[in-house]
Each structure stands twice: as structure tokens, then as C-alpha cells.
């Protein structure tokens, strides 16, 4: 087990803010839109440098999605910014018709995804967004794991033509990926090679998976940890290669167990290599108010739960 | 493109023939609103707009049109074909399997002239605003037009867009409402009253005009007047009175022909009232 130490903690949304600024510097067609959450989305640096390329929409997310779609006609690359709940469920039909079905090059950037939004509670803690967005034909779905990966992903999606859903979060979390990484959409990242169990993790759960891997190593279990930052298109090759070796799977995500990363992997394996799998995910419920770490423990989304899931699935191997 | 009124009248009659024939052929579609908006779309595409039928999605340097009430696709498709975006023969494929002429307009099948999917109502004004703001960023002085149903104004997103455009001085946008007073379940005044539309749009900060949408000369004059009022700090709204089903007597003024196709006998009755001057597809 490789040792991962973090030098500092930062929120993934700040990675988005830094990436947006750089994407704006790289390409003058990049524009940003926000529905009254500039501070939360960390868009200030972009606005300061490119005031004429920023559009304050107000609390009107449906209008924001339509305006973004319209701006692509004329060659702009719009990045919309609001909370994940208001980026998806609230405006699903606008995204479906005006962006996805219309093949528009809009980047839907969503902060405060999942339970780790914390004290605001379930009205804001969307746990269904990955499922909603991956069901839209042509939509790319990305859930990066730390500040550096979020920044790199933000830069990368500006260079990718087509609608993208980029999901990140509110809390400060460890930074453990390279600052100068090149983000490749759809290409899984091998965090740690192992032989006994494949742990596929996305978003904030990647760090938890690394912690779990260290605990498992102490128990004599050699876990392979793979970061699936791109849920759609899924890196089928990386998943199948790993599973052929380990023959059992744990998936870990800050999302409802219905419709998320776990289901994408289960579907792939059902068709290609049926394999025992355990889900570390929210068990079909809404969240609630609380501190992020307390919520992750209560809803079973921490390293200890990944360890238990790994032990359980290893025992299920034939 | 500028053609004398008589010629435009001939084109409008031909477009109306296309509409009833298309809807009859597949026994599906929306003739009422299509017939009501025929004169507006003929005026726009054959007289008012500076547009390029060779079609480029980005539409830089040309006027753009967005159809928000996508169910009147028959009139949109006929006008696009007749102004050169694609072969009129393709109108025969309307609503059929493997057609680019889907029930509601879409970019998905690559039909020239369509820049956004519409059908789920209330979304087109936001899209038009986005395209208009992109034009401003590009230093492009051409205009953006959009058309909306009056029943469509019951959608909340319209009013988000209504608030946004004046605040941001989107004054290169000329929106029009097809004010026929009808929707699927009956008169708008019965289903959900629209109230005083002029006062509403003016209160939101729009430059509001009125027009008779079934008088070609009147609608052309209104659109030209709207163009002259562009770039003066306000988005422009034309409240355009139309008759649903205009041009076919038994379809006129009733919501009953919103989404119903004529049978063989009714088709003949309609065509008898619309003497062909150009060739049918």
C-alpha cells in the first residue's frame, strides 16, 4: 500500500474556481454564468479578470441553463455554476431539451454535492444527481476527488466538445493528487495496485478508500484502489482488468446507491464478468443536517465502512 | 431578401397548403397554431431577416430565429424548406420514422435551420437571450428573433427570462407572442388568464408593440419598426394577435384544431380555400 500524505486541505470547489480562471485564460470563448452563488462557487477570480465574460443570472436556474445553451450558438463555451441540487433536479428538463438533446457545449458545474454540504440539510444535499445526469444521452459525468483533480478536470472539460456535468463539494478535504496532473476524461486513475479486492471510488470517497486501504493492509488484505473520476463514459477496460485479478468489488460514492457509480460498475460486470460487489453509498434515503464528518459516518460513507465492505465481499468470493 | 407583398401572399398560401398536407399525411401534428403564425414566419424569413440558408450553427453575422412553441413545427419546416434550407420534398417525411422533421424541432437529426430543440414549453426565450448576448460578445450587430405561444406564458421560466433581458439590456432581441387566446384545454382566459400582457411586459422593462399577425403588411411594418427600435437599451416584445387556424375557415378561432389532423374530406375543403400558386411538395 502506497502511503498518501497530504500537505494541506482545500475544498474541491476552490479547485473549480482556480480551473475556471485558467480555462478562461486558455480560451477567450470560455464564459461563466452563476445563479447568485458566486462566493460559494469560487468564481471571484474569473469575474475579476474577465468581467465582460461573466453573467450574473440571479436565482433563476432554468433561465441560466437556457441562456448557456443559447450562448453556445455563437461559439461560446459556457460554464454554469450553482449548487448540485439546483444544477440538476431543479432544471432537469431544461438540461434535457435545451442542452443534451440539442447537443450544446455547456459545462454544468455543481458545487455542494452530497451529504458533505452539511448543516443546510436534505433540501440541498442532492444524492441523486449522478444518476440523473448519466441517464442523459451524450452527457459526460465527472466527480473529481480533490482540489488538484477538480482544477485539472475543469481545465480539461473546456477542451472537450459536448455537454459535461462536473460535480464537486463544499468541505475542505485532503489534497493527494499531483498539482500538475493532466486530466484525461474517461480514464480511471490507479491509486494503488492490489490483488485481493478492487475498490472503485469517486469524489470525496477516494480519500476514504485510501484510508481504508491502509487499514486493510494492516489486516493483511491487499486492496487495489482505483479512482473513477469519470462515471460516464466509464473506463470499462480499467474496471474489467482489475476485477479479472481481484474477483471482488467495493464501490464507494457520496450518492444514493441507486443509479450512481456502483450501478454503472454492476451493469458492466453483469454483462462481462459477474462479480460479487458491495456498495458503500447512501441506502436510498435523504440526508439531514449535521457536520460533514458526522453525516459521512452516520450514512456509512467513511473508511471504516469501506473496510467492512471489503472484508464482506472477499468472504463472498467463490 | 425582399419580395413584394403579392409574392409573400402567394408564399404564405403555399405554406398553408404545406401545413395541412403535412399534418394530413401523417394524421398527426398541430395545424391551428401553424396556420395562425404563417404570415409572421413568411414575413420574417422572406422579408425581414438577414439570414443564410446555407446554414451554419453559430450564425455569426446573420439574424437568428428561435421557435419556442415547437409544436408549430409544420409552419417552421415549410418556411425553412421554401426559403432554401432543405429540399421541399423532405416535407413529406414529417413525423415519420427516420425523418429529420421530428414532431417537434430538434438539432439532433441535423436539419438545417434549426438551432435548438423545442417542444417542452417556456425554454426558447432564455436560449434566444443567450444567443443575443453571445452576439454582443462577438461584436456581431445582427438580431435575434423569437416566437412564443400565449399559453406558453404560463410557464415560470418565461418570467425568469422576462426579468433578465431588460436588466441586462438585451436590446438585440425581438420576441413575439402568438396571441391567439387559445390553448389545448380551451381559451386562455378560461384555463389560466394572462391578464394585461402589455402592462406585464412593460412592467418588466420591455419595449412593447402590438401587431396584427394575420395581415402581412401590418406584421412586416411591425417587425421593421421593431428593428428600428433595437439597440436602444430594451428588449422588444411584439404582442401579435392571430387567429388560430387562419386561412382555413372551419379551423379558425378554435382551440379544437390545436393538435388534430384533418381527414381526407377536410383536407380537400382546406385546399379548396388555399389556391396553390407555387408547386406543392
Image: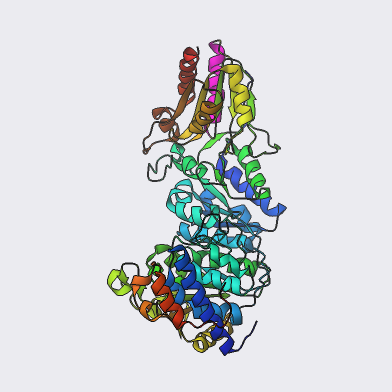
Residue B206 percent across, percent down from the top left: 47, 77
- Above or below for A105 versus A215: below
Residue B161 percent across, percent down from the top left: 47, 66
Q: In this view of the protein, can residue B167 be seen by the observer?
A: no
Residue B223 percent across, percent down from the top left: 54, 83
Check if residue B75 falls in the magenta segment.
Answer: no
Picture quarter with the N terminus of chain B: bottom right
**Predominant secondary structure in magenta?**
helix
Q: Who is closer to the viewer here, B75 or A95?
A: B75
Picture quarter with the C terminus of chain B: bottom right
Q: In this view of the protein, can residue A148 be seen by the observer?
A: yes
Magenta region: which residues?
A204-219
Q: Who is closer to the viewer here, B124 or B245?
A: B245
Left or right side of A52 for A123: left
Q: Who is closer to the viewer here, A304 or A88?
A: A88
Q: How many numbered dots are placed on residues in this image?
A: 0
Q: Who is closer to the viewer here, A299 or A179?
A: A299
Check if residue A217 falls in the magenta segment.
Answer: yes
Q: Which residue is drawn at 39% across and 44% down?
A: A120
What colour scheme does the image use?
rainbow
Residue at far left of view: B190
- Above or below for A294 versus B236: above
- Above or below for A16 versus B280: above
Residue A263 percent across, percent down from the top left: 48, 32
Q: Quadrant of residue A243?
A: top right
Amino acid at each position: 500500500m502506497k502511503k498518501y500524505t497530504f500537505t494541506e486541505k482545500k475544498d474541491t470547489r476552490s479547485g473549480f474556481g482556480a480551473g475556471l480562471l485558467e480555462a478562461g485564460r486558455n480560451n477567450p470563448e470560455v464564459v461563466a454564468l452563476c445563479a447568485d452563488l458566486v462566493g460559494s462557487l469560487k468564481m471571484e477570480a474569473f469575474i475579476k479578470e474577465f468581467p465582460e465574460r461573466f453573467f450574473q443570472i440571479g436565482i433563476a436556474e432554468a433561465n441560466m441553463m437556457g441562456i448557456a445553451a443559447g450562448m453556445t450558438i455563437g461559439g461560446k463555451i459556457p460554464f454554469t455554476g450553482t449548487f448540485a441540487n439546483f444544477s440538476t433536479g431543479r432544471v432537469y428538463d431544461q438540461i434535457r431539451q435545451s442542452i443534451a438533446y440539442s447537443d450544446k457545449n455547456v459545462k454544468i458545474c455543481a458545487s455542494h454535492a452530497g451529504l458533505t454540504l452539511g448543516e443546510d440539510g436534505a433540501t440541498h444535499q442532492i444524492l441523486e444527481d449522478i444518476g440523473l445526469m448519466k441517464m442523459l444521452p451524450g452527457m459526460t459525468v465527472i466527480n473529481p476527488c480533490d482540489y488538484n483533480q477538480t482544477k485539472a478536470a475543469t481545465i480539461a472539460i473546456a477542451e472537450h466538445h459536448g455537454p459535461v456535468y462536473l460535480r464537486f463539494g463544499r468541505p475542505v478535504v485532503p489534497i493527494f493528487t499531483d498539482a500538475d496532473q493532466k486530466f484525461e476524461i474517461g480514464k480511471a486513475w490507479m491509486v494503488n495496485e492490489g490483488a485481493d479486492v478492487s475498490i472503485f471510488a469517486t469524489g470525496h470517497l477516494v480519500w476514504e478508500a485510501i484510508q481504508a486501504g491502509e487499514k486493510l493492509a494492516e489486516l493483511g488484505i491487499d486492496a487495489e484502489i482505483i479512482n473513477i473520476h469519470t462515471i460516464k463514459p466509464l473506463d470499462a477496460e480499467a474496471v474489467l482488468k482489475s476485477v479479472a485479478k481481484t474477483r471482488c468489488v467495493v464501490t464507494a460514492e457520496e450518492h444514493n446507491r441507486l443509479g450512481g457509480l456502483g450501478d454503472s460498475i454492476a451493469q458492466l460486470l453483469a454483462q462481462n464478468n459477474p462479480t460479487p460487489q458491495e456498495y458503500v453509498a447512501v441506502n436510498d434515503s435523504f440526508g439531514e443536517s449535521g457536520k460533514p464528518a458526522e453525516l459521512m459516518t452516520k450514512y456509512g460513507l467513511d473508511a471504516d465502512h469501506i473496510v467492512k465492505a471489503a472484508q464482506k465481499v472477499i468472504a463472498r468470493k467463490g | 431578401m425582399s419580395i413584394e407583398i403579392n409574392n409573400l401572399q402567394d408564399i404564405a398560401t403555399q405554406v398553408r397548403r404545406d401545413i395541412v398536407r403535412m399534418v394530413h399525411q401523417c394524421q398527426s401534428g398541430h395545424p391551428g397554431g401553424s396556420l395562425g403564425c404563417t404570415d409572421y414566419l413568411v414575413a420574417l424569413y422572406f422579408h425581414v431577416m438577414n439570414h443564410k440558408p446555407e446554414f451554419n450553427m453559430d450564425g455569426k453575422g446573420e439574424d437568428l430565429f428561435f421557435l419556442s412553441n415547437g409544436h408549430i413545427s409544420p409552419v417552421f419546416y415549410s418556411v425553412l424548406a421554401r426559403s432554401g434550407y432543405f429540399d421541399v420534398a423532405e416535407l413529406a417525411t414529417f413525423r415519420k420514422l427516420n425523418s429529420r422533421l421530428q414532431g417537434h424541432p430538434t438539432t439532433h437529426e441535423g436539419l438545417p435551420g434549426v438551432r435548438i430543440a423545442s417542444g417542452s414549453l417556456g425554454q426558447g426565450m432564455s436560449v434566444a437571450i443567450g444567443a443575443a448576448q453571445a452576439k454582443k460578445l462577438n461584436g456581431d450587430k445582427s438580431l435575434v428573433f423569437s416566437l412564443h405561444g400565449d399559453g406558453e406564458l404560463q410557464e415560470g421560466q418565461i418570467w425568469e427570462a422576462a426579468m433578465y433581458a431588460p436588466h441586462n439590456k438585451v436590446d438585440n432581441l425581438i420576441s413575439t407572442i402568438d396571441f391567439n387566446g387559445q390553448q389545448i384545454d380551451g381559451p386562455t382566459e378560461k384555463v389560466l388568464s394572462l391578464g394585461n400582457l402589455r402592462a406585464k411586459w412593460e412592467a418588466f422593462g420591455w419595449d412593447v408593440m402590438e401587431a396584427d399577425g394575420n395581415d402581412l403588411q401590418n406584421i412586416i411594418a411591425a417587425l421593421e419598426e421593431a428593428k428600428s427600435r433595437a439597440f436602444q437599451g430594451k428588449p422588444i416584445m411584439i404582442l401579435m394577435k392571430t387567429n388560430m387556424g387562419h386561412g382555413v375557415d372551419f379551423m379558425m378561432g378554435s382551440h379544437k384544431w390545436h393538435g388534430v389532423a384533418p381527414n381526407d374530406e377536410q383536407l380537400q375543403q382546406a385546399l379548396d380555400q388555399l389556391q396553390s400558386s407555387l408547386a406543392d411538395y
